Amino acid sequence: MTWPPLREELRGVEPYGAPQLDVPVQLNVNENPYGPSLACAADIATAVGRAATTLNRYPDREFVELRTALAAYLSRDTPHGVGAEQVWAANGSNEVMLQLLQAFGGPGRTALSFAPTYSMYPEYARDTVTEWVVGHRESDFSLDLDHARDLVKEQQPSVILLPSPNNPTGTALPLEAVTLLCEAAGDGIVVVDEAYGEFRRSGTPSALELLPRHRNLVVSRTMSKAFALAGGRVGYLAAAPEICDAIRVVRLPYHLSAVTQATALAALRHAPELLGRVDELRAERDATVAWLRAQGLQVADSDANFALFGTFPDRHAVWQGLLDRGVLIRETGPDGWLRVSIGTADEMMAFKQALIEVRTSNE
């Protein structure tokens, strides 16, 4: 037997992860380029300091205070409100998704999404021994609802994963699509992944509005993006209390540390400030999309803090050319496409200048 005795389907698989390179302009993992203020950082430090005096004890296993604060925050996006009993949190939305697949996926069950989509989804399925089925999106990266409904009815998946806005395309789902798939799924769980939800354009509603209508709907969020808390590793979801109760069966004991809970609560106290740059990033995104189109490139409509653009006969050469000029973006999505995160105005100017130089040198 080959050592170590790894599961056969994992042999030769490279670990997930975008390149972490020390370059002047880092626009590859959709981070918020604006960090917390000194006041916010001081509040976090004070909160963590208080938590440090109790680290000889396990944290609140049910993290009631944090769930209450997250529910209050989410309630701003729906006229129906969200209760603490409807909220669950974990170490990043990645862990939230993995827990959902642990609870509702598994051997003999299927998870389904529509490509192109977040590249971690099939890994969640693989890691939980859940069969992975993928449908397709249209050329504009929207969903053909007839195709989507037919595929769901044919496969009868236990879990459907629907990012909105979609990663890597930035495409948002209309609420009619969410309702159609919730109804088609029967008892299957429908997860609308709103990791980039705060960046959606004006008039684009959140799937949170549909929670009272569909007991099988889950809406997930993260504090990594709009909240500028990628290093804090906090993700969360809103769903029927029965779904939150089910996740308790698979969660690890005391999975959210006292330090994580203190950090997240402090960040939520500064929500208006941390989210204050969202409008600025939206405007920068729209300006970037317009500029890329003016260069003769295709760009997907985006409700996120990134733009998918192309197409290039050799996208790796373009990616490398940008990197050689100190600008790191992401080589992801369909063949020929690249994705750029939205940074500061100066960072986006550096990206534009580098892209012009790369395209000129390749002509």
Image (cartoon, helix red, strand yellow):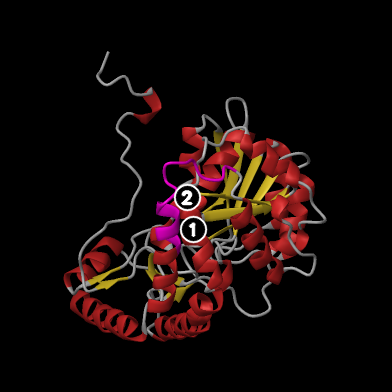
Locate residue 73 relative to residue 271 in the image: left or right: right
Above or below 85: residue 324: below
Is residue 333 visible in the rendered image? The answer is no
Q: Position of residue 214 (x, y in %)?
A: 79, 51
Q: Position of residue 16 (x, y in %)?
A: 35, 46
* Location of residue 20 (image quadrant): bottom left
Q: Are marks 2 and 1 in contact (CB under 8 Å)?
A: yes
Q: State the residue at coordinates (20%, 73%).
A: 326
* Location of residue 322 (image quadrant): bottom left
Q: State the residue at coordinates (21%, 65%).
A: 320
Position of the N terminus, as image quadrant, is top left
Residue 258 image label: 2
Q: Secondary structure at mark 1?
A: helix
Q: Nearer the viewer, residue 157 or 18?
A: 18
Q: State the residue at coordinates (34%, 23%).
A: 6
Calculate the distance from the C-alpha at mark 2 to the C-alpha at mark 1: 6 Å
Above or below 42: residue 336: above
Most frequent secondary structure within the magenta stretch: loop
Residue 60 shown in magenta? yes
Amino acid marked by disc 1: Ala
Above or below 25: residue 258: above
Q: Nearer the viewer, residue 244 or 47?
A: 47
Q: Secondary structure at mark 2?
A: helix
Q: Nearer the viewer, residue 296 or 339?
A: 339
Residue wearing tag 1 = 262
* Location of residue 297 (image quadrant): bottom left
Amino acid marked by disc 2: Ala
Q: Residues within 10 Å of mark 2 (few under 14, many from 20)?
A: many
Q: Which residues are magenta?
A: 47-61
Q: Residues within 10 Å of mark 1 (few under 14, many from 20)?
A: many
Locate residue 215 relative to residue 335 in the image: left or right: right
Q: Position of residue 59 (x, y in %)?
A: 51, 45
